[in-house]
Amino acid sequence: MFDPNCVCFFDTTLRDGEQAAGVNLNAAEKLQIARQLEKMRIDVIEAGFPAASPGDFSCVQTVARELKKTTVCGLARTREGDIRAAAQALAQAENPRLHVFLATSPIHMEYKLKMSPDEVLAEIRSGVSLARSLVREVEFSGEDASRSDPEFLIKAFKVAIESGATVLNIPDTVGYAMPEEFYSFCRRVISEVAAPEGVIFSVHAHNDLGLAAANSLAAVRAGVRQVEGTINGMGERGGNSAIEEVVMAIKTRADFYGLQTNLDTKRLYPVSRLVARLSGVAVPPNKAVVGANAFAHEAGIHQHGVMAKRETYEIMKAEDVGCTPAVMVLGKHSGSHAFRARLESLGYNLDDLQIQKAFEIFKKLCDEKKEATDGDIEAIIADQILSVTPECHYELKDYTVHVGSDLAAAAVVLSRDGQPVKDAATGNGPVDAAYQAVKRIIKFEPKLETFKITATSERSDALGEAQVVLSYLGLRAQGNGASTDVIKASIRAYVNAVNRLYSMAAVRDIRINGCAGAGEAGAKGQAGTAHEGR
């Protein structure tokens, strides 16, 4: 039953959406999408153009047979063969609709159809009448309506109603309309057609000028109660009106539109991902409502505002479209509030000085890569915050490596107590050469028990996180290092483990290269052993 306070949604992803260049969905893929659209409670699904090909016929037939709640629609020109093919494909549908179209603009009638206005009206009458004799629900579209003479379009719609049409569609076929003029256009057409109760006006907007959603919403304001579009705005040329954008505008600005819909918007994001995956048409990250960045915040001011109160920078809830809650993307524009909050969410309890230092390191990292993942942040904390020891501390300042076919050489510069110390060595690879150089600097040779490198995320710009375990004089220490350069990460991990060895030695009163522990006598007793071990 028609409800003037409810906007219906007509999805043409499987028909108009598939007309996007390079898209070719098979029957199984179309059925997967159709099932999810039905779960989302879409009102009408245009499953295809049955007369276009045997494959299209089969797809419409399959979708019509499988879906039991949603209206399934097949497209047809006003030709008898098209209409009968569509009716046959829809024969097993619980709720079938036949969608008949014919151009009504002067440019289309003259150059494409080569028909006079009177001939077009006669064609509409015969085509819609035949469709209505075969299917109880018929939609008529005046193709290129937005460039049609309003008086002629009104005549065409009146003829369609007289012939049995129950839905009248006003397409902006080439995305030509402007929202303000389209509002007035639709309002005039609806008013002067004066359709009987139960006849619904529809809109089908294209996005050639980026105005499809705006024109669809303008039409809704004018009295249209069915919006046609596709998931992700997929379609020919610039695409169609994106259903997710229109429905969320109506829902988010209920105060303005005063209307409701039947859609379960929590399924928008999953359906968007499904369509993108099966069609091969990726969703741009900045795509409204369903893009990866739709609920992401990087700017420090925005992050602070969202943490204080979500509505400061979010007009929709991520959960309302089936997406995960707001993501704080940490990058070079992020502020300390967001960074501190992320540390706390990761389970770290650092003091203000540690957080300040970590934030400075984080900012330097962001000069090397756009965003920092949780893994990157944890690597920073493990490498450069929690690994720092006061007893004896080396810090990597610089390094160079040269690799040949059989040999590698490395020069490493460390600092200790603010003073640079450097040396060089060769090895059987760049990491081994660098480690040999470090051992020459520290003047003892711990045993490398474990060496491992992993990526902090699956992204191509992920940090490489190195982990090593060194042992010496019964002591065993793990070191971590992180960097976008795996050689640098490996050296940092080694130096980190060396520093931990010094810390452990201090606790046990063991002296390593003049770095004494708490008990001077005990340290002296172990000094010779330490040097002899070298």
Image (cartoon, rainbow, N blue to C red):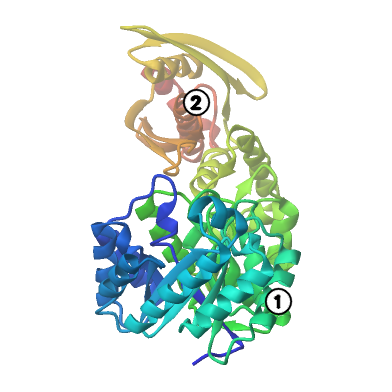
Tell me the CA gap for discs 1 and 2: 67 Å
> Is residue 323 found left or right of 5 in the rendered image?
left
Quarter of the image for residue 88 reads bottom left
Residue 11 is situated, as x and y percent measured from the top left of the image, at 45, 69
Residue 168 is situated, as x and y percent measured from the top left of the image, at 54, 76
Name the foreground residue: 187 vs 376: 187
Q: Residue 352 has which mark?
A: none
Give amino acid for label 1: Arg
- Identified at 23% across, 58% down, the residue is 54
Q: Which element type, helix, strand or loop, lies under badge 2?
A: helix
Question: Are the residues flagged by discs 1 and 2 in contact, CB closer than 8 Å?
Answer: no
Name the foreground residue: 129 vs 48: 129
- Identified at 64% across, 81% down, the residue is 193
Q: Nearer the viewer, mark 1 or mark 2?
A: 1
Please report whichever mark, 1 or 2, sits nearer to the chain's N-terminal start: 1
Res. 315 visible in picture: no
- Identified at 37% across, 77% down, the residue is 131
Q: Which residue is mark 2?
A: 488
Q: Is 1 rendered above or below residue 424?
A: below
Q: Residue 187 has which mark?
A: 1
Q: Is 351 rendered above or below residue 188?
A: above
Name the foreground residue: 143 vs 263: 143
Give amino acid for label 2: Lys
